[in-house]
Image (cartoon, rainbow, N blue to C red):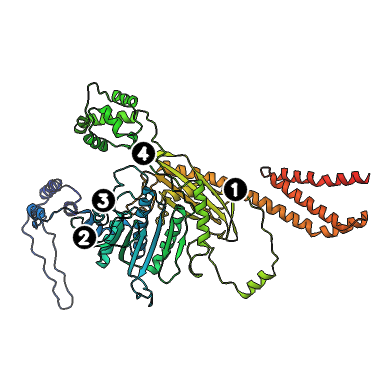
Amino acid sequence: MAARKAAAVRAKGKAGGRDRERDQLELAVVGGAAARRSKPAATPPARAPARKAAGRARPAPVEEPELLPPAPEAEPEPAPAARSPRRRATAEQMAQQQREISISEFFTKNRHLLGFDNASKALLTTIKEAVDNSLDACEEAGILPEITIEVRDLGLDEKGEGDLTKGEGRFVVVVEDNGPGIVKAQAPKIFGKLLYGSKFHRLKQSRGQQGIGISAAAMYGQLTTGQPIRMISRTGKGKPAFGLEIQIDTRKNNPVVTAERQLDDWHEHGTRVELEIVANWQQGQRFVNRYVEHTALSNPHATFHYLRPRQAPLSFPRATDELPKEAQEIKPHPHGVELGALMRMAADSKSHDVRGFLQSAFSRVSSTVADEIVKKAGFKAKVRPRDVAGDRELARKLHQAIGATRIMAPPTQILSPIGDTLMRKGLVSFLNVIETEGPEEEEQLDLDAARKKKATKKGKAAKAEAPEVPDAPPEEGVEKIKGHNYFIATVTRPPKVYRGNPFQVEVGLAYGGSWPADKPIELFRFANRVPLLFQRGACGMTEAIVKTDWRNYLLSQPRGSLPVGPMALLVHIASVWVPFTSEAKEAVAHYPEITREIQLAAQECGRKLAAHIRKRKHADYQAQRRSLFELYIQEVAQAIGKIVKRSPDPIKREFLRLADQVTEQEGAGEGLDDAALEEQSRKITRRPRRAEEEEQE
């Protein structure tokens, strides 16, 4: 019994189930008790091996061995200390490898952030940056823009013969304008230095914001082809025209002029930019086509000429000779400033006290408002701006006081929206061009079914046999374009503010025509008149349109998707600072104030569209009723003529006049519901019967 207990204890000790000291104590107690109970005996012999005997084998007697006290377990050897990793570099050696990174060098390795993801998209980005600069310069100088965009395939010879480049190849992009030109001393920095321009440091509505676009395109061309950007400019009549070839020193972000020339005969004023880049025309041309179309739509005051390889030139004439309203520069609003920016502005201020600093550095801060802010900040003695810049606690009190003070919203007259009239003209001009543009097999818009197709002989014969249907009378808001009726509606919302920056939202739509009725609508997004063609799903504009319930306006809409119907929807935001989601300026951030304004504008347009659809359905219903009536009018007129013994022709003319009268009066009752319109129709149809009964009496 004692032996079994000792064996069990040892097994538990080996399994690690109990504490080591407790196990040893228990083994000692059990072993001592067993020794007291047993008699003293000689050392037992060892177990004898079995022997084979003649006849039978006798097993050797086996006695149990005496239980000895267990030997104490050996202590585990301590684990060797972890070896520290071998030191491969010292702080001094790492310091020698550190150096400053220029902005050009950074974007050389991260050009996808600027929209140069691939050769197809790079073609569009290059054209877009050059055209944006041309439009901004022309509008700021008060010149009606006339811009030429040309794409040349270097795979073709000078006569344009050869095979078009398939896939990636070398192309030359040329953008020429009639703007005010560029001063020669500034041209190298404009085209050869990233983050250099006049638009970043001022709050004014413009297409460019960062001063990085055209120089980034020059950097991309230099990286892919090794060729510099070539430009020609002239600032006015009587002044010399000059041409420069500019490269970028990416390590220092500095321009390097590699060639210079002077031209005697060139345009009166303007700028020409020429870049040689690696592009994919086969896949990228559809993006460029859509960009040119949409830019002409949002800039109806500009003329565009588009020259492409092996295709006929395309021109978008201007729809108006009136320049858009000039955008004014404003100062930042105090409610949009952050603490660090406030301290920096205070350090740069030349005012003698905080009151003067607030009035001179911000908009909408009068002397009364400045006194209220200083009072809420608790400044009793005279505080200078430099004190605010150097003391974070003072700056924090001033920042909190600004946020607690009611200040008038920023001025909104500094914005330059497209406007309802010009937006309508732009839509008409856009629809006029896209239906006749390009070869027959080329699709210009993803959702536009207005492209021409060759008619079959059977179709031509059926069209010749079909009777001619007279055009319906023109309706309010309906434009007939290339044989198709489009209902056009536009809405311009009043200006609003986000983070202290004023903005304004516009929405326009074109419904009907030859666009497919079983596909999602086409959504055109614009920011400061610039088309946004990529990242539609990540844009706040798309989110606002999707969240609008278009079923209330007689359009079908799957859950979480754009509505379905024959419609193109234009959404434009104008602001002194558009909150883009990336440097490529492809999508607008999801600010609640912006998405809410877009929803309200879309709902207002939707109400106009619903009224048009109801009116058209009612007119179609009345036309069906009238056609049924006219189907039997000849027989009815002849029968009545026999009864009253009169010629059937006057009776037929009277019936036709009555049908016209009923249709016109029911059309005038547009605001009535179906039951009221039906009752009105019944009343009108009873009148001739009463007149006829009076004549018979």
In the rendered picture of this protein, how many numbered marks are placed on residues? 4
| Mark 4 vs 1, N-terminal side | 4
| Mark 2 vs 4, N-terminal side | 2
| Mark 3 vs 4, N-terminal side | 3
The residue where tag 3 is placed is 196
Residue 257 badge: 2
Q: Is residue 71 visible?
A: no
The three-letter amino acid code for the residue at tag 4 is: Arg
The residue that appears at 88% across and 47% down in the rendered structure is 692
Where residue 481 sits in the image (x, y, percent)? Answer: 57, 58
Q: Is residue 625 visible?
A: yes
The three-letter amino acid code for the residue at tag 1 is: Ala
Asked if the residue at tag 2 contacts the one at tag 3, i.e. Cβ–Cβ closer than 8 Å, the answer is no
Where residue 413 sits in the image (x, y, percent)? Answer: 42, 39
In terms of depth relative to the viewer, which is nearer, 164 or 57?
164
- Mark nearest the camera among 2 and 1 is 2
- Mark nearest the camera among 2 and 4 is 2
Where residue 141 sits in the image (x, y, percent)? Answer: 36, 49
Asked if the residue at tag 1 contacts the one at tag 3, i.e. Cβ–Cβ closer than 8 Å, the answer is no
For the residues marked 3 and 1, what is the alpha-carbon distance in whole angstroms? Answer: 49 Å
For the residues marked 3 and 2, what is the alpha-carbon distance in whole angstroms? Answer: 17 Å
Asked if the residue at tag 1 contacts the one at tag 2, i.e. Cβ–Cβ closer than 8 Å, the answer is no
Element type at marker 3?
Answer: loop
For the residues marked 2 and 4, what is the alpha-carbon distance in whole angstroms? Answer: 42 Å
Residue 610 badge: 1
Element type at marker 1?
Answer: helix
